[in-house]
């Protein structure tokens, strides 16, 4: 509260009406969909799962979908499906949630971190090329903040080097790249449906693919590695009850009532996407004229359904630290967050031998960025108050 005391003013928002950085948007139709399923015969392993997967295929134009318990499970399943094992290297963006690289560790592989671009914060294609070795098996590319990665360039690199491409699209459902929906190009695309994402199942995730063999492995990974498909069994079926475990899988299933919620949410995807575009436009117009800030560069080829809105502080124009700006914004009742600490800075990764300095652009970016409130349910007043709070702090700390 130091900033407010010095200025002798009042915060933009009081403590009871703070604006969170992210929030779900649920309506009565969502609630009714869940209640209807709760009253049905199936709470899990029922018909809503197939209905959800069909809906996801329609939206993404992918041939196959495997819905699962969360986005981390989806990433793990993807690494299992492509056969990541000890000795394999997987190139991952340095600025992302830890799950993007943890999934490689789950399978015994080695994450190799690629730097990001200074203006879009997406993975740097040239650094990806530099990091490829004869041990490289795959690339995990993150659609950071919802903007699609340069998927065509990555696809070309993977084809040239016989690599798998996993698109971590936790941020980007609804986004299109060069007119193609996210989910239709990579070998496997993974989604997350956490409450702060564009659409939610409470928790939940999915893997999308056009490859039938990968689809079958993804489905096995989700359900203990167990199948009732005679074509996949080692032995002849003994009857209608018979099943076989043919690989080591996990219980990564999603429930029917979560699926029902997500189906309802997906029906509003365009509404959510359009509102997020409106808010981004308002922020871009307000902060693009503020020399204390840098705003994320738009990727022309990406028709983006925005997940996060990031401001980057200009140290040449501001006298405060990022922490001071963050705390001041919180005191104004507009709660920020930081996405993300470079993965290899976490103590666990340090213990594995990763050191600071691997990705200098990502590290410099992290030191200056923060995410401000951004979600479809924001009112125009919420947006205006967030803009007012950010500009107020910039004016106070301007050199």
Image (cartoon, rainbow, N blue to C red):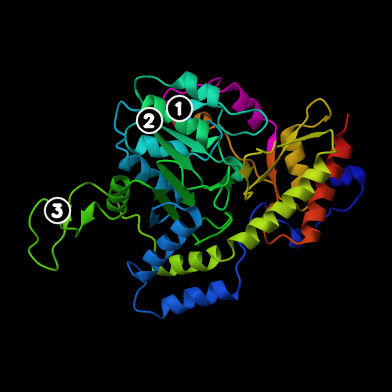
User: Reading the chain from its start, which is encountered first: label 2 or label 1?
Assistant: 1
Q: Please report the residue visible at 55 percent of the width from the left and 66 percent of the height from the top.
A: 267
Q: What residue is shown with label 1?
A: 157
* The image quarter in which residue 255 lies: bottom left
User: What span is colored magenta in the figure?
Assistant: 349-369
Relative horizontal placement of residue 186, taking residue 246 as reference (left or right): right
Viewer-proximal residue, 269 or 9? Answer: 269
Q: How many numbered marks does the figure carry?
A: 3
Q: What residue is shown with label 2?
A: 163
Relative horizontal placement of residue 342, taking residue 226 as reference (left or right): right
- Measured in 3D between alpha carbons, the distance from the residue under mark 2 to the one under mark 3, in whole angstroms, is 29 Å
Q: Is residue 276 above or below residue 398?
A: below
Q: Quadrant of the C terminus?
A: top right
Q: What residue is shown with label 3?
A: 233
Q: Please report the residue visible at 58 percent of the width from the left and 60 percent of the height from the top.
A: 269
Contact check, label 2 and label 3, Cβ < 8 Å: no
The secondary element bearing badge 1 is classed as helix
């Amino acid at each position: 509260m130091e900033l407010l005391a010095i200025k002798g003013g009042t915060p933009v928002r009081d403590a009871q009406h703070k604006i969170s950085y992210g929030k779900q948007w649920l309506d009565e139709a969502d609630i009714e969909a869940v209640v209807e399923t709760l009253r049905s015969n199936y709470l899990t392993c029922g018909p809503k799962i197939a209905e959800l997967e069909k809906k996801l295929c329609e939206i993404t134009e992918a041939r196959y979908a495997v819905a699962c318990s969360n986005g981390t499970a989806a990433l793990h399943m993807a690494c299992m499906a492509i056969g990541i094992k000890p000795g394999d290297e997987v190139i991952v963006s340095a600025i992302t949630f830890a799950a993007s690289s943890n999934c490689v560790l789950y399978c015994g592989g080695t994450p190799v971190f690629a730097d990001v671009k200074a203006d879009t914060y997406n993975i740097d294609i040239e650094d990806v090329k530099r990091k490829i070795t004869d041990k490289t098996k795959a690339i995990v590319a993150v659609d950071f903040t919802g903007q699609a990665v340069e998927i065509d360039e990555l696809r070309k690199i993977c084809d040239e080097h016989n690599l798998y491409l996993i698109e971590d699209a936790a941020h980007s459902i609804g986004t299109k790249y060069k007119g193609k929906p996210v989910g239709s190009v990579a070998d496997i695309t993974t989604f997350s449906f956490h409450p702060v994402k564009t659409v939610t199942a409470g928790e939940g995730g999915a893997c999308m693919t056009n490859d039938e063999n990968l689809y079958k492995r993804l489905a096995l990974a989700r359900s203990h590695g167990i199948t009732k498909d005679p074509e996949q069994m080692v032995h002849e079926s003994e009857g209608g009850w018979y099943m076989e475990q043919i690989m080591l899988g996990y219980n990564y299933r999603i429930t029917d009532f979560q699926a029902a919620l997500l189906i309802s949410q997906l029906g509003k995807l365009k509404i959510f996407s359009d509102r997020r575009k409106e808010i981004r436009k308002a922020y871009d117009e307000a902060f693009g004229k503020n020399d204390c800030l840098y705003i994320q560069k738009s990727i022309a080829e990406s028709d983006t359904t925005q997940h996060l809105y990031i401001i980057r502080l200009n140290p040449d124009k501001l006298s405060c630290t990022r922490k001071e700006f963050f705390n001041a914004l919180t005191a104004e009742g507009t709660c920020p967050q930081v996405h993300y600490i470079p993965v290899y800075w976490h103590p666990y990764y340090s213990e594995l031998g990763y050191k600071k300095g691997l990705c200098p652009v990502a590290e410099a970016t992290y030191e200056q960025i923060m995410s401000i409130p951004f979600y479809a349910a924001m009112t125009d007043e919420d947006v205006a108050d967030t803009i007012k709070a950010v500009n107020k702090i910039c004016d106070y700390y301007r050199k």
